[in-house]
Amino acid sequence: MKTTLAMAAISAAGLAALGGIALAAQDRSALKVPSGLSFSEFKGYEAWEDVAVSQVPGSQKLIAANATMMAAYKKGLPAKGQKFPEGSRVVKIEWSQKPNPASPYPVQVPGELKSVAFIVKDTKRFPKTNGWAYAKFDVDPKTRTLKPEGTGAECGYACHTAVAAQDYIFTAYPPR
């Protein structure tokens, strides 16, 4: 019985490691939302500066922005009536939550990657959506690879119209 349980634990650990390997080995540059943005348009997003974090039940999200957008954030945007500059880019990386067993107090930390979403401002390419385009890539639980969600660059626009007065951006840059 103990041997069977130990083998099951080793198998589960191996499968989890393989899932991480699948994400690491995936050629993300080839990913594209059908009729929409491609992952390759956001090369280097991993090094963008943090804007803020957000939390929804069961998930944690990091919002980061490129240098163009960060400069605007540091000048006080989003603000009523003010616009982010062309070339502004945002990434939202979402993870499941898990407790940190090493912490001396209860704290939730990122667990499994759930999705990576992007936003870009380009009024020439996306005039119908006030210059903003959106793309989201979810982790497929079966293959442990990222898959595009939705179609077209407008796939996040309807949600963001709630903050049209803030140039369609929800997250503010909090004091540091």
Image (spheres, grey):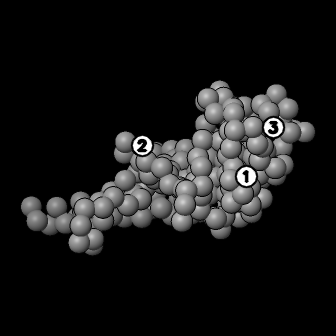
Q: Element type at marker 2? A: strand
Amino acid under disc 3: Gly
Q: Quadrant of the N terminus?
A: bottom left
Q: Position of residue 96 (x, y in %)?
A: 40, 51
Q: Earlier in the sequence, mark 3 or mark 2?
A: 2
Q: Relative to 85, is 103 on the left or the right? A: left
The image quadrant of residue 27 is bottom right
Q: Nearer the viewer, residue 174 or 50?
A: 174
Q: Relative to 103, is 163 on the left or the right? A: right
Amino acid under disc 2: Val
Identify the mark at residue 56; answer none if there is no mark: 2
Q: Element type at marker 3? A: loop
Q: Which residue is mark 3?
A: 131
Q: Earlier in the sequence, mark 2 or mark 1?
A: 2
Q: Earlier in the sequence, mark 3 or mark 1?
A: 1
Measure the alpha-carbon separation of dots 3 and 1. 12 Å
Identify the mark at residue 89; answer none if there is no mark: 1
Measure the alpha-carbon separation of dots 3 and 2. 27 Å
Q: Is residue 28 visible?
A: no
